[in-house]
Image (tube, helix red, strand yellow):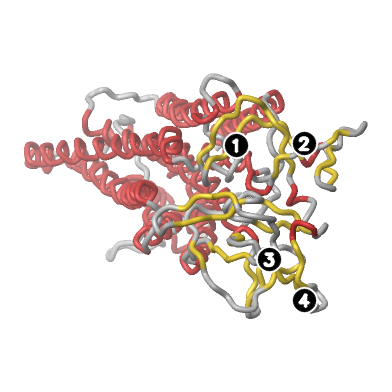
Amino acid sequence: MTNLLKFSLSVRRLWLAVVVLCFAVDSLGQQQLPCEFRDSVNISGGTVDAQSNIHHDGIKYEPKHYALISYDYAGFDTRVEVPVAYTRGCICQLRSCVRLCCPVGQWLASDGNTSACVDSDGPFKVRVNVSSTSGEVQSVNLLEEPKFGVVHLKPCAGMFPEVLDEWSVDDFGSLQFMGESIPQNEYCLNVENSSGEPALYFCPITHEAASVTMKIGIIISIPFLLATLLIYACLPELRNIHGKSLICYVFSLTCAYLVILHLNMGWDFIPCKLVGYMFYFWVLVSFFWLNVMCFDIFWTFSSGVVIKNERRRFWYYSLYAWGSAVALTCMLLIIEKTNLLPEHLRPNIGINRCFINSDKMIEFVYFYLIILLLVVLNVYFFIVTAVRIIRIQRATDAVLKQDSRRHSKFEKDRYRFSLYLRLFVVMGVTWTFELISWAVGENGYLFYVTDVCNCLLGVIIFFLFVWKKKVRQLALKRIGTPHALSRTKSTTLNTTSSTCTATASAAAATTTGEGAIPLNRTTSRDSQA
């Protein structure tokens, strides 16, 4: 237990060092907008006072509300570099924002297949009904109303027009219609004629029920993951190399789920950029530890080399899993904060969302490609292992039956293979569908079903590795419950102390065989079996 605690502390220190490095490098790089790009406007034409405040269109931007950047967006999510850096201010932090579909002086023209912003004819104004908290409604020109700020980037890629009767905008920029409030990041206004009366364009309706189900699934999974973590950490019989690997896997998966919950709940007590790096790191760690478990069972059946020092072998595995995730995260950070790659090829975490830029190729190279390679590698490990098991069973079945010790070990290894195979199928298949949904677009309930399955992975892991008779017996024995020891039809629990010790040892050996058993370990106990 002491070694496990030391290892956990070293991992935490390593992760803390990565976080400190993130902030250190971030402070040396170019300025970052303190808001989403779509909630900001170009204020390069403003005047700067002695306190470094920028005054633009009657609004004062303090230094915490603007940044000097060197990129822009073409269309919805295509980030492009600009030759000269310019200042952009977070107007939505200072005013109630209302979103236009096109820049001021333009309107969105569509031929049914494509749409583009074109110049308007004549004077440009945006006249809407504004409803106050007191219930009063008045028609105003948003461009002249001091409490409103106007931004002009579409809130989503594909928008559709819809005609509504008797709608208005409240003091916070939300659309009010028949008692329903629609926030400004879900619609935009399109002024199509000189009258100034805008048409409404909306983002596609999302599957709210599926989103809520995913949140519930994560909330349910986290206690099951913590229970698995606690049981395997507290039971010495399970803290062999495979139990420790499972502990690291479950720990990283729990951290990833907590980050996902933070994102889905809309919390903001962790900076968006840091959330992106944390999500990237913990998801990769969990996949690398799953890869370790798949490799370990592959090595058991496919290699004649035996590493008897389990501590050394576990440190090799830890160096691979934790080290690979740390290296990839640091690589992502270096690419982000240096000029090694052009601006449009960088991950741009925290710019448009709290993860890698939504450009499909960028997202694939930095994230999904790694996941795909690990999934393919795990499939290879399991195919080779399955073939090896079939060959061993056919060739040596008669011999193994005459050698009860070797037969017992082979059965335990085969059982563990089937256990890890089920875990990989659950995680590998769902992430395969995740890759497909990312490639073709997240449409249809099929992909929401796979997301929900991913969110319930903690429950599946608990029932695979914990909710078994032998593990329950060990847990009950640990807390001192008298019915923890296994019994047979011909024996009772009221035996001598030596009999109790032998029974407990047999239960422990059987448990590790069904859960997380050591590989190729030769001990005096094995020699006596």
Q: Residues within 10 Å of mark 3 (few under 14, many from 20)?
A: many
- Along the polypeptide, which appears first: circle 4 or circle 1? 1
Q: Which residue is mark 2?
A: 45
Q: Which residue is mark 1?
A: 72
Viewer-side label of 3, 1: 1
Q: Choose between 132 and 429: the one closer to the eye.
A: 132
Residue 137, labelled with which disc?
A: 4
Could you tell me which quadrant the C terminus lies in? top left
- The alpha-carbon separation of the residues under discs 3 and 1 comes to 26 Å
Q: Which residue sits furthest top? A: 340
Is residue 425 visible in the rendered image? The answer is yes
Is 66 located above or below residue 341 in the figure?
below
> Mark 2: which secondary structure?
loop
Residue 448, labelled with which disc?
A: none
- Along the polypeptide, which appears first: circle 2 or circle 4? 2
Say whether marks 3 and 1 touch (CB < 8 Å): no
- The alpha-carbon separation of the residues under discs 3 and 4 comes to 14 Å
Viewer-side label of 2, 1: 2
- The alpha-carbon separation of the residues under discs 2 and 1 comes to 16 Å
- Along the polypeptide, which appears first: circle 3 or circle 4? 4
- The alpha-carbon separation of the residues under discs 2 and 3 comes to 29 Å
Q: Which residue sits furthest front? A: 122
Q: Which residue is mark 3?
A: 174
Q: Residues within 10 Å of mark 4 (few under 14, many from 20)?
A: some
- Along the polypeptide, which appears first: circle 2 or circle 1? 2
Q: Residue at x 75, y 70 (%)?
A: 130
